Structures are given as structure tokens and as C-alpha cells.
Amino acid sequence: MTNIQSGVRAMGSEVLGVGRNIWLAGLGVVAVVGEETKEKFGSLVKKGQAYSDTQADRVKSVKSWVGDMEKRAASTGDKVEGIIQKRVESGLHMMGIPTRDEIKLLIDRVERLSEQVAELNKQ
């Protein structure tokens, strides 16, 4: 074998070695990226779960607050309704107009008196 042939073989061997190293480096990159991706993905899942839990607590807190406000509003509405009703009744009394309850009492009395009159007529 001549020096040229040996040189070519040595170069070819060297090129193959470099090519193989490039190939292995590429596989290493794929392996590292895969590992880091799994780690990052796991980390992101944990952070996402923690954030979700935090938001769930916030949503519960807001729902509770809204529920409290609804109860307060209903209570306040009932109080206002009572105040208005008393004022209207007072105004009606000032004008000499009987309230619904007073009219009902009168109707009940008239019915009882009618029953008593009917009993007396039977005798």
C-alpha cells in the first residue's frame, strides 16, 4: 500500500470517527432535551396544579362573599319593605282609611255576627 492510500484510509477513518462523534452528539442532544423536557413538563404540571388550587380557593372566597352580599341585600330589602309598609299604614290611618288587616278583622266579626243572627232566627 502506498503512502497516498494509507493517508486516504487514515483520513477516511478520521472522517468516519468525526461523523460518528457528530451522530453521537446529536443523540446526546436528543437525550438531554428529552430529559429536560420531562423535568420541565413535570415542574409545569406541579405549578399549574398549585395555581389551579389557588384559583379554586379564590373562586370559593368570591362565591362566599357574593352569597354574604346577597343575604345582606335581602335583609336590607326586608327592612326597607317593613319601613315603607309602616309609613303607608300610618298615612292611611291619617286619612281614615283602614288597613288590610283591619278590614279582615271586620269581615271576620261580620261573619260571626251573621252566624249568631242565623242561630237566633232558628229559635
Image (cartoon, grey):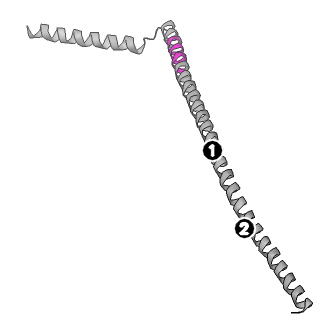
Q: Residue at x 55, y 17 (%)?
A: 80
Amino acid bearing label 2: Leu
Judged from this view, the residue extending furthest toward the right is: 3
Q: Where is the N terminus found, in terms of image quarters? A: bottom right
Badge 1 amino acid: Lys
Relative to 121, 4 lies left or right: right
Mark 1: few/some/many CA within 10 Å (<14, 14-19, 20+): few
Kindly state the secondary structure of the residue where label 1 is placed: helix
Q: Dividing the picture into quarters, in which one does residue 117 lie? A: top left
Closest to the observer: 83 or 32? Answer: 32
Tell which of 98 and 24 is nearer to you. Answer: 24
Q: Is residue 111 magenta?
A: no
The residue lying at 80 percent from left, 75 percent from top is 17
Report the magenta residues as a range: 77-86
> On the image, numbered disc 1 is attached to which residue?
46
Which of marks 1 and 2 precedes in the sequence? 2
Q: Which residue is mark 2?
A: 27
Cα distance between the residues tagged 2 and 1:
29 Å
Crowding around mark 2 (Cα neighbors within 10 Å: few <14, some 14 to 19, many 20+) is: few
Specify the quadrant that holds the C terminus: top left
Whole-percent x, y for residue 21 in the image: 79, 71
Q: Residue 39 location in percent, x, y?
A: 67, 51
Q: Nearer the viewer, mark 2 or mark 1?
A: 2
